[in-house]
Image (cartoon, rainbow, N blue to C red):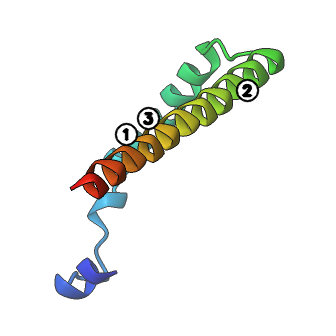
Amino acid sequence: MFLILMYPVNIGSRPFLNPKNMEKIINYFVSSWGELKKVSWPTKNQTINYSLLVIGLSVGFAVFFSSLDYGLNWLFAKLLAMR
């Protein structure tokens, strides 16, 4: 919307809607739909397994880095207390 206000356009002309461009747009969507039909989609069981794997790894990394952060914080606090 900002670009429309910044660059005035002749409202009566719509060069992007000419028949040549419309044909390109339609061909794009037709070919995209054809490519989506070729995709080998994962099964429901695979999707659940991959989702659980991602969640498990995320929790594992969170626990690892949280404990690393806590341990280093504790270590530096002890080292600074010795001074």
Vertical arrangement, residue 36 with respect to residue 16, above or below: above
Residue 53 placement (x, y as % from top left): 67, 22
Q: Which mark is residue 24?
A: 1
- Check contact, mark 1 vs mark 3: CB within 8 A: yes
In the figure, is residue 19 to the left or right of 15?
right
- Residue at 59 percent of width and 23 percent of height: 36
Most foreground residue, 10 or 80: 80
- Nearer the viewer's eye, disc 1 or disc 3? 3
Q: Give the distance between the C-alpha atoms of the residues marked 2 and 1, in whole angstroms.
A: 41 Å
Vertical arrangement, residue 5 with respect to residue 76, above or below: below
Crowd band around label 3 with a 10 angstrom C-alpha radius: few (<14), some (14–19), many (20+)? few
Query: Pointer 2: what residue?
Result: 52
Query: Pointer 3: what residue?
Result: 28
Specify the amino acid type for callout 3: Tyr
Specify the amino acid type for callout 2: Leu
Most foreground residue, 68 or 40: 68
Vertical arrangement, residue 31 with respect to residue 80, above or below: above
Q: Residue 7, located in which quarter of the rendered image?
A: bottom left
- Nearer the viewer's eye, disc 2 or disc 3? 2
Q: Residue 55, located in which quarter of the rendered image?
A: top right
- Residue at 36 percent of width and 44 percent of height: 75
Crowd band around label 2 with a 10 angstrom C-alpha radius: few (<14), some (14–19), many (20+)? few
In the figure, is residue 21 to the left or right of 54?
left
